[in-house]
Each structure stands twice: as C-alpha cells, then as structure tokens.
Image: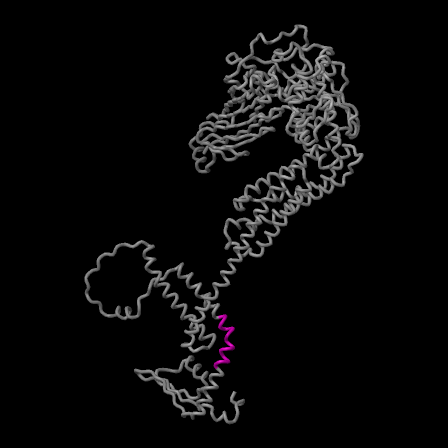
Amino acid sequence: MLNKLPKKMKSLTPKPLTIRLHGGVPTSAHTTNLRNHGHPLDNVEPYTPPHETRIEISEAAPSNLQTQTHKKQFRTQTAMRHLKRIPVLMRVGAQTTKNLGLSLALMARHPVQRLPSKEVQKRSTRPATPTPLPRPETPQLPAERHKQKWPYALTKKIREYVNNCNELMARTLRVNPLHSKALTAFVIIALVLILPIPIFSFYQNIQAQGEAIISDGHATAAGLKSGSARLAQGDFDGASREFSKTLETVEHTQAQLENIKTLLPLLPKSSTAGLAKELPGLTDGLKSLSFALLNFSEALKNIPQEKTAPTELIKHVNEALAVTLPRVHSAAAAFEQLDPGALPKTYQETLTQAQRFILALDADLTKFTRVNEFMANILGADQSRRYLIIFQNDAEIRPTGGFIGSLALLDVDRGAIKKLEIPGGGPYDFQGQQEKYVRPPQPLLLLNDRWELQDANWFPDFPTSAKQIMWFWEHAGQPSVDGVIAVNASLVERLLANLPAVELPKYNTQVTAANFRDVTQTQAEVLYDKTENKPKQFIADLAPEILKKMAEQKNPDDVLTLALTFSEGLMEGEIQLYFTDTEFQTFAKTLGVDGAVATTEPTTDYLYVVNTNIGGGKTDRVVTQTVYHEARVEEDGSIIDTVTIKRTHNGAADEVFYGADNINYLRVYVPRGAELLDAAGFSVPDERMFSGSETWYELSPLIDSVDQKGTYDEKSGTFISNEFSKTVFAHWLHTKPGETSIARMTYRLPFKAFEPKPTPSFVSRAVRIVTQAPENVLGYTLYVQKQPGVRQQDMVSTVVLPEAWQTTWQSAPFLQDNNRMTTYLAADRDSTYALAALKP
C-alpha cells in the first residue's frame, strides 16, 4: 500500500508507536484495532503495576496536512471494507434470526430460573446477621412457579442472544464492538419488519391453492356421481366422457399437491388429510375405467347393425367385453385400495358409493359375459332348439313366481324365432287332452279336484316344478321340448320400459310399461270374446309385437340395455331356466338361475318363506309383507328361532281385481330336523270350501319323490313335512281388504351355536386366566332365500346373544342394542350373513 502512494504522501506515513500496557500484555482485540487504524505495532513494553491499568500511547504529533490526509485515507478504506462486507452482513442477519428462533424455542421448552445479580452475590459473601425466622410461604402450583420464572428466563435468553450477535458481528465483519451493537439492532429490526411480508404473501398463496384443491374435490365428487349414473343407464360413451373429465380434475389436484407437498401441514386439515395419499390410486382407477368404457363404446359402434343375427350380436358384444374387462378389473382393484376415511367428510360418502358401484360393475360384467355365452347357446347358436315358455302372473303369487296364465311354444335357430305358438285359451286349452287324471296336493283341493297344467308349479324348487309342467304338457299329446323357461309379468314391464309403445290396432290400444298390467287384465278377464272363449288371445297377440320391437333395436346400446334387463331378471329370479341337457342345466345351476331350493351346510340356519295364492284373485299386487326373524342363542348353545310374518292387504273391497280376500297357503322352509315349538295367528278355510278327489285319480310320482308326506301339529294344526332336504312348516293365512294378518312360528334348530364345555378343573381355569383364552366361541350363519315374484317385502333379522357374550366379527352391518344384533336384508335377491362371538 505504501509503495503505491505518491512521494508527497509517503512522508505522511505515521511513525512507529510505543505502547505501555499497565496491567498485562495487549489483547488481540487491542492490537487488531490499532493495526486497522494504520498504526504499525513495533514496540510493545508490558509491565504490570500493582493497582491500576492504563494505556499510554506516544508518537510525534502530525501536522495539519498529515492529519487531514490521514482522515481521508481512513474514511476511504473504511467505506471499501463495509462495501465488501454487505454479503457477509446478509448471512449474519440470517444467522441471527435463526439464533433468535432457536433461543426462544429452547427458552419455551426449558425455562431457566432467574440468576441472582452480582450485587446480591457480593452481599451473600458477607457475614450473615441474625434475622427472625421467615413465615412459611404458601405453596405454589408448578404452573404459578413457571409463570413467575419465564419472564426472567426470556430476558436472559434475549441478552445472551444479543451478545452472541455482537460477537458474531465483530468477528465476521471486523466491526468495532461499539459499532457492532448498533448494527445488530439494525439487522434484527430490519428482519422483523421485512420478513413477515413475503411469509404472509406465501401463506396466502398456499391458502389459495388449498381452496382450489377443495374446489377440485367438489368437481371430482360430482364427476363420479354423474359418470356412475350414466353407466347405470347404459350410456357408456357418456360415462367415459364424465370419467375423463373427472380424471383431468384429479390430475390437476395431484399436480397442485405435488407443488406444495412439503407445505401440506400449513393447509386446513379438512382439505388436505389423505389427499396426497389417495389421489394416485384414484387417478389410476379413473384412467383404467375411462379407457375401458371408451374402448367398449367404440367396439359397440363398430358392430355391424344390418343383417346381423342376435347370436352374432351377442358374440360381438362378448368380444368387446373381452377387451374391456382387463381394464375394468384394474379400475376395480385401484378403487378397492382407496380409503374413504382418509378424505374430507364431504367426499367420503361419494367415494364409498363409487367404490361399491365399480366393484359391482366388475362382478356384473364378468358374470354378464358368461350369461351372454350361455344365452347364445340356448338361443340356438349351434343348433335349433324348442322351449316351453310359461308366463307367470305375480299378482297371483305361486311358489315359482306366479300363476301360469299363459304359455308359448318357441322354436329358435341362431337367435332367430322360427316359430311361436301361444294358445288363446292358455293352459286351459289342454284340460280335455290329459291322458291321466292326477290327484292334486291337498291345499289345491280348494280350487279343483284334480291337478292340471295351470297349477303345476306347486314346488318352490323350479327344476321339480318344471318337470311336473313338462309331464302335464307331454301327457296332453304335445311335442317334447328342450327345456322350460318361466317369465314373470314384472320382467315384461321392465322390457317395455326400454321399448317404444306397442301398437295393437285390433284392440284400439297401445301398451306401455305404465298400463301393461291394467290393459292385459282387462282384456284377458273382462273384454275377451265370450263366444270364442279365448281369454288369453290378447296376450297371444301382444307377445309377438313385443318380440318384434325388440328385434327392431339395432343400436348396440339399445341391444345392450335389453340384454342387461334380461341379465338382471335372471339374477333376481324373474326368469328361471330348466334344461333337459345336463351340461346346460349344470351351467344354469352354477349361474344361480335354475330357481332351485338352496343347498346349505348342516350348521347353517336357513329360511325360505313361500306364499301360494289359492283363490285369492290378483290381490298379491296390493299386499305388502314383512318378515321378522329372530335367532335367540341359549346359555347351553341351542338356538330358538321365531319367524313373524306380517301381511297387509292394501286393496278395497269394491275394486274389481284387488277387492277379494287374500287366501295364502304359507310354507316356511327351515333346516331339516328343526322342532316346532309353537305357531299362532293362522286361520284354516272352511272345510266345506274344499273339493274331494276321486279315489281312482293317480298320485304324481314327484309328490312321493320329494317325501312330502308329513304330520299335523296337534296344538296349532301346522302341517310338518320334509322337502328338498329341508323341514317345512305350513299353514293358512287369511287377510281381508284393509286388514293386517300377523302369524308367528317358533322352533328349535337341530344344531347349536356352540358346544358347552364341561366344568373346568382348577388347573385348566388357571391356565385360561393366564393365557386369557376364551371359554367358548360362538358362530352363527343365516341364509335367506327370496321367493320369485314377491317384490313388496321387507326382511329383518335379529340375533340375541347370551349374557356376557361379545361379538368379535360380523359379515354385515348390524344395529346393536346390548346383546341384540339387528340387520336388514335385501328384498330382491337371496341374502346371507354370519357372525362370531366370544365369552370373556
């Protein structure tokens, strides 16, 4: 530096100093400070006087010119040094802020008791003078003591923090200690004032993104609902569009969460809980579902619509499903893994419904594919086939679904109808053609003294009834058939709901789903030609027109909707199938469309309530039924069942079709070997209303084959028999218009919920207490079969456990009231549930 100065300035260089330090050697701070002011320290002469410390500096007094030049030079150097230290100053500010935060956090967690001042410490060293004993202080709670300590601890922590900042400033920036205090204060104040501005803005931005995420959540919920609704309607193209939009919303939400994933705790919990975890799975599920529906919709559009046989259409639909199903499986798997409980409550119900719908869709489409293959075969995809179709009127309930009011002989080949014959008189046209006269089951004597085709569906097991129907058909001189198909009137209503109105100019009317029942009953029972005496001719004319409307549906979406209607009818027992071909019949049983009485395990409770309208008109259309089932488990493990049947006749006595009394022969099928304990609420029709059969009438071989022979309970008059590996309790229930009938049966099951163990020894009791092993395990399972054709029915089941028993597992949702467990079962199909309980 000196070499670069002009010659005139070199003479102004300060002369060497002589420093005497009274009290010790110079400190590094002293020497550094003096050297920074431009004084070379050449001579240091320390000595230590006994009582005082002072510094003496001597040098030659500079001239005025030297002083001014020196001041200018000093200010220039100082300015340059401070300019270079600005970045360091910023780092120091950040460090000081961090130190302050750490100090405050430590102070809050570990409050420090105030230390006595130096003055107090000095006084404490003096000899103590006698003072009176202090009064005992009132004990203070820990919170109060902490309240008194924390201000002093805060003061101490702040003082320590400021001192640390001063030292950091002096050491890092090489600033005069006096100046560093001011600089420290400036930095702290600047940070306190400036930092909240961007932090507040940043938090506002996070809140805005949180609100956007919440908005996306509403849009996602709406999209799931809309897409599911379109899918349920068979609108696959529209469903694909809705799910695609929903997918875009979910991906947008996922991108927003990805941007702020490290800051999610700053957002409200209701809007962020579980979103980041569940959105990837929801995205995968929606992608798979959208692509599946889009591919399926495109495949349906590519199916040729002109001159295509129905079996070929079914084949094309199955090919489209084969491409679609893997993606539907993937979507179902992704949705199944989602946890609705991890989302905000606003969206939990929507996601739960979507999960159920998509899982059901996966199962239904898989089964629908198998049903389609099955339908193609029975429709003659490989060869021509002939079937006897019986139309059952569920307004007059019978064991398999309804009274046989009409029937048809159908020939099909490659799905095309080659021949359809519907007798105008229905089954009554064959009354005089029977080769044999058969004695009917005893309850049917209320109507007729002999058994005929219209009453042949007496057995709730449809394969058995179908064999009886075929027996009557063939013994009337009719051709043999490949099977029997039962179709309920309620299914025809559902088909008409998906078809244009059927015009019948001959009758000057049109038939729709809304008026089908009334028009059909009026034409068949009131307005038919009494001279011609063909009351079922209207149905014979209507059926081909309905089939024609169905054949005119060339749009794949419409064809698929009709196919889905048939599929649902099969699953709900509105269509029941019996085939003479063993392979076909086995497949029908596998699909659960054979209408057979269910086979259950020996230790499974079983209930099948079967209604049979005998002479009660069409009143079952206005009768509502509720079945209450209660299984009470006794202390010894035995199970006592009570079944209560409540039937309400909602018709009026003056109504043409619904004003008659409802006369119902009621059969309750329970596990084989059950013991009837009590029955009440039943009423037997007057014996004079029954006909007597001729002694020479033959007995049906099927009556003997199902071992229907039984006995009557002396107390209640209940008929007890065994059929289809079940025990049957049968009685009459008579309900007048506007009234309610309630009947009850109580019986003991042939098995126990648990087997009581013998009284344990002292050692075994001790082992059980130590191992906490349960004394007994209780298990209970119920299977409820639904009668085809019965639609206005509620089913409630209750299990009553012994005292001190606690349920540990259940397969269905229950309402629990102490030891009573109640659940509501499906009214449109078979139901089952199971539970387990332990005795502590």
Residue drawn where x is 54% and y is 15% of the image = 718
- Quadrant assignment, res 783: top right
State which quarter of the image contains the C terminus: top left
Residue drawn where x is 47% and y is 68% of the image = 95
Task: Check the image and name the residue furthest to the top.
Answer: 695
Q: Position of residue 756 (x, y in %)?
A: 48, 27
Image vertical order of residue 8 relative to residue 252, above or below: below
Q: Position of residue 20 (x, y in %)?
A: 37, 87
> What range is drawn magenta here?
78-91
Indicate how the structure is coloured in the image: one colour
Image vertical order of residue 346 relative to residue 580, above or below: below
Main SS of the magenta part reads helix
Task: Check the image and name the residue furthest to the front.
Answer: 508
- Quadrant assignment, res 259: bottom right
Q: Position of residue 693 (x, y in %)?
A: 64, 7
Between residues 426 and 58, which one lies in front from this camera angle?
426
Is 179 placed left or right of 746 in the picture? left
Does residue 592 show up? no
Residue drawn where x is 21% and y is 57% of the image = 135
Residue drawn where x is 70% and y is 33% of the image = 370
Q: Indicate whether residue 88 is drawn in magenta.
A: yes
Is 348 placed left or right of 497 in the picture? left
Image vertical order of residue 271 relative to residue 415, above or below: below
Does residue 736 show up? yes
Q: Position of residue 613 (x, y in %)?
A: 60, 17
Is 291 placed left or right of 93 in the picture? right
Q: Indicate whether residue 523 is drawn in magenta.
A: no
